[in-house]
Image (cartoon, rainbow, N blue to C red):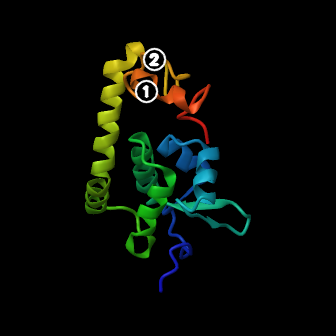
Amino acid sequence: MTDHHAHPRPYPGQELSVGEVAERSGVAVSALHFYEREGLIHSRRTPGNQRRFRREVLRRLSFIRIAQRVGIPLAEIRSALDSLPDGRTPTRQDWETLSAQWRAELDDRIRRLQQLRDDFTGCIGCGCLSLDRCGLVNPHDRLSAEGPGPRRLVG
């Protein structure tokens, strides 16, 4: 079994410092540290305890940022990355496969956003204190029967 967290000794230019990764990817150093803690990316430590990332992390970060931008939760992104053989960096084929899996969820999100956009003038948000004119989530003030205050955001 291959340990995808271990890196062989690098060739010159094969690895990047955390600052170089941040600069090249446009991702803040703090976000890189967070992604690493969450298991989305991996680095090795030099004898001086500095992080070194393989260049492939740039493609992996692009994958993460694109998926986040369309609303895929980090847990699903991690699961998708973990499903790749040997923890490899996603290829074009990997992205096509994963995006096909996420298509139904994204289509549903698009539909809800379009509905919100189209009905936004009369809406002040989900759980809108059971306003009687909310046609999105509370037509005819049906949530008022459940009590006062926001109903959909409770819990």
Q: Residue furthest front?
A: 145
Give the class, few, some or many, for how many residues have Cα within 10 Å of label 2's Cα (few <14, many ≥20): some
Dot 2: element: loop
Q: Residue furthest top?
A: 121
Residue picked out by circle 1: 138
**Is 15 rendered above or below residue 21?**
below
Residue picked out by circle 2: 132
The quadrant the C terminus occupies is top right
**Is 19 rendered above or below residue 153?**
below
Coordinates of residue 118 in the picture (x, y in percent): 31, 20
How far apart are the two marked residues, 2 and 1, measured between alpha carbons?
Answer: 7 Å
What residue is rendered at 37% in x and 22% in y?
135
What residue is rendered at 45% in x and 56% in y?
77
Report whether 130 appears left or right of 115.
right
Mark 2 and mark 1 lie on one chain; the one further toward the N terminus is 2
Give the class, few, some or many, for how many residues have Cα within 10 Å of label 1's Cα (few <14, many ≥20): many
**Is 20 rendered above or below residue 12?**
above
* Label 2 with label 1: CB-CB less than 8 Å: yes
Q: Amino acid at mark 1?
A: Asn
Coordinates of residue 34 in the picture (x, y in percent): 62, 51
Q: Is residue 55 visible?
A: no
What residue is rendered at 45% in x and 57% in y?
76
Dot 1: element: loop
Coordinates of residue 104 in the picture (x, y in percent): 28, 49
